[in-house]
Image (spheres, helix red, strand yellow):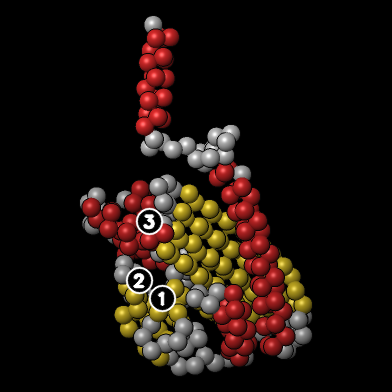
Amino acid sequence: ADAVERIIQGTHVGEITEVLNDLKLLGSEELPLKSVLRSYNSNNLVSTKAPDVGYKFIISKSGELPNNRYLDPRGPYSFLFDQVKGLVISKDSLPAAEGKYAPYRDILDTEVQSYQKEHFPDGASAVFLEKSDALGCEFTIYLSNSKVSQPNFWSGSWASTWRASVSEQAGEVELTADIRARVHLYEEGNVQLQVAKSLSKKLSFESGSAESLARVVVSEVCDSESALHAAVLEGFASVAEGAFKDLRRKLPVTRQRFDWGRRAVHRLAAELDRATRVVSK
């Protein structure tokens, strides 16, 4: 059971169906896959489409409700999610959130959506108001995107979690982030790139202004994620020119590919084989 859970948790987003099918062939159908997949889907910020909704829902810890239901604060909706199939089964509308910081969440969510649509047009985002009191509040921002090309044997995903602790009276917000990027290339091999980055920043905004808070937070999200993205691309280019290049078969000094199909080549190989046997004797 532990081995199966490790396999599932290590699976790249977009490849889970194939992995589950292989596990079933190995006799793992009796294992509590739903509970393992609940953790997997939340940890990887798996996104899913819902009927009659123009954006994707994110499966996250902040949105977890009893009985495989999740909260989407943008709707707001409560939706039932099939952990194994990765599909929304049904959704119910909820009353609009109330309270002093509900408009702050809405304005921040609008700003986050603009960023997500520009940088992750096929991805998803969500903003949760976790708690609030007389001094301030705390938001969690989720950003998720994944792309899979099974015919070309690759997949990639981006998942970032930002927490904003807001001191409204002081006009300060403390941002912390966990960002993960993963790439998997598996044509005649198994090459994986995994990047994890943690950040912490303290920023100032105009006290009492939800718009100022949203602009400051999303500007930092954009700058930090863009910098990490650029660093990943630079590192990937370095690997491609270094380690990957060293793994490739080198061309001969003539810079021409060796034609292994020519009869002369087979004759040469046979003669070398005979010469080697003579020397060995």
Q: Amino acid at mark 1?
A: Thr
Q: Quadrant of the C terminus?
A: top left
Give amino acid for label 3: Ile
Residue under the point 35% across and 71% down: 86
Do the residues under discs 3 and 1 have CB atoms within 8 angstroms?
no
Residue drawn at x 39%, y 9% as measured from the top left: 278
Label 1 with label 2: CB-CB less than 8 Å: yes
Q: Earlier in the sequence, mark 3 or mark 2?
A: 3
Identified at 38% across, 52% down, the residue is 7
Q: Disc 2 residue type?
A: Gly
Foreground mark, 3 or 1, reads 1
Q: Nearer the viewer, residue 96 or 192?
A: 192
What SS does tag 1 mark?
Answer: strand
Mark 3, residue position? 8
Task: Confirm or deny contact between disc 3 and disc 2 (CB under 8 A).
Answer: no
Residue, disc 1: 48
What whole-number distance in Å separates the C-alpha atoms at marks 3 and 1?
19 Å
162 to the left or right of 19: right
Neighbourhood count class around disc 2 (C-alpha, 10 Å): few under 14, some 14–19, many 20 upward: some
**Picture disc at residue 86:** 2
Q: Is residue 187 above or below residue 165?
A: above
Relative to 168, is 54 on the left or the right? left
Mark 3 and mark 1 lie on one chain; the one further toward the N terminus is 3
Instruction: Give me the C-alpha separation between circle 1 and circle 2.
Output: 7 Å
Looking at this rendering, what residue extends furthest in the top direction?
281
Quarter where residue 18 is shown: bottom left
Image location of residue 132, percent across then percent down: 61, 82
Report the front residue among 252 and 244.
252
Q: Closer to the camera, 63 or 82?
A: 82
Can residue 133 be seen in this snapshot? Answer: no
Q: Secondary structure at mark 3?
A: helix
Q: At which x and y percent is residue 171?
A: 76, 81
